[in-house]
């Protein structure tokens, strides 16, 4: 395939040294999905490209690409950085995990569709100081669809009942009403916990404002989401393990 110069808008979320003075920068882009830019000479002292591909930089990048393999970076413009995601260890851990979660759901250069906006807004809200755990849980629940798991949050997954009380059943594939509580395995979540899971699973992230959720509720939802991923999605992310350790130590 012939290479052409293309301008993409995206977020650099990972970079590593390549050869003597080059850098490989992985980017989540609006138009070409996730791919790796080859940034030649980025590690040289006078490089004008290096600062544009620091982790959690965001802007417009002009690359030479055939939409296969590495795409050399030619130039950039209007690049800014999510500075808090770069400098704050806790926020950095959340951001790295969420980007990793998106990265593993798609193949190289595959369109992300609505999930591009999901991760962009999530990182923007993290950087602005919104509750990182709530944002993380929202992204995790909505990213299940990208992994082929599409939980039913709107109504009972078995009979379609729209009125609660509800619980969550992994085997049923979503929330279930009380008529089926004794028919399938369920999580035994309370009403507030189920309501929060349904809200986070359904709400448009652009509409998510500051919400106060009790620590025990967030902990219960965290446990539920971890169980859903463990039983339905085959993932073993180092970034998730690191984030879990951060949570454990309450860093």
Image (cartoon, rainbow, N blue to C red):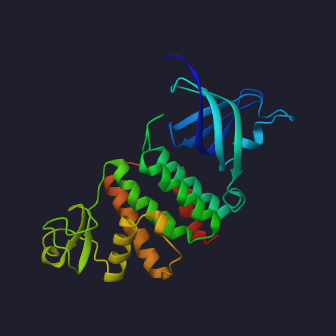
Any part of residue 54 in sight: no
Between 167 and 47, the one lying in front of the other is: 47
Give the residue drawn at x 37%, y 71%: 199
Q: Is residue 16 left or right of residue 121?
A: right
**Image position, residue 65 (x, y; %):** 57, 25
Q: Is residue 138 left or right of residue 17?
A: left
Number of numbered discs present? Answer: 0
Q: Is residue 247 left or right of residue 182?
A: right
Give the residue drawn at x 58%, y 57%: 95
Q: Quadrant of residue 18?
A: top right
Give the residue drawn at x 19%, y 65%: 157
Q: Is residue 225 left or right of residue 242?
A: left
**Image position, residue 243 (x, y; %):** 56, 60
**Image position, residue 230 (x, y; %):** 36, 57
Q: Quadrant of the C terminus?
A: bottom right
Image vertical order of residue 61 relative to residue 115, above or below: above
Between 204 and 71, the one lying in front of the other is: 204
**Image position, residue 28 (x, y; %):** 55, 43
């Amino acid at each position: 395939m012939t290479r052409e110069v293309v301008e993409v808008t995206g977020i650099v979320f990972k970079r590593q040294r390549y050869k003597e003075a080059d850098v490989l920068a992985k980017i989540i882009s609006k138009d070409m999905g996730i791919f790796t830019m080859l940034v030649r000479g980025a590690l040289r002292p006078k490089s004008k490209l290096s600062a544009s591909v620091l982790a959690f930089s965001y802007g417009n990048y002009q690359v030479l690409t055939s939409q296969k393999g590495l795409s050399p970076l030619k130039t950039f413009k209007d690049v800014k950085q999510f500075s808090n995601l770069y400098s704050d260890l806790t926020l950095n851990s959340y951001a790295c995990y969420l980007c990793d979660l998106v990265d593993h759901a798609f193949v190289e250069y595959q369109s992300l569709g609505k999930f591009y906006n999901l991760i962009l807004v999530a990182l923007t809200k993290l950087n602005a100081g919104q509750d990182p755990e709530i944002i993380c849980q929202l992204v995790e629940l909505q990213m299940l669809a990208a992994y082929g798991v599409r939980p039913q949050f709107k109504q009972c997954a078995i009979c379609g009942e729209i009125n609660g009380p509800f619980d969550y059943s992994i085997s049923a594939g979503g929330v279930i009403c009380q008529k089926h509580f004794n028919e399938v395995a369920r999580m035994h979540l309370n009403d507030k916990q189920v309501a929060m899971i349904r809200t986070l699973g359904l709400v448009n992230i652009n509409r998510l404002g500051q919400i106060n959720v009790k620590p025990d509720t967030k902990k219960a939802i965290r446990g539920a989401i971890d169980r859903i991923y463990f039983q339905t999605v085959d993932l073993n992310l180092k970034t998730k393990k690191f984030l879990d350790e951060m949570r454990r130590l309450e860093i």
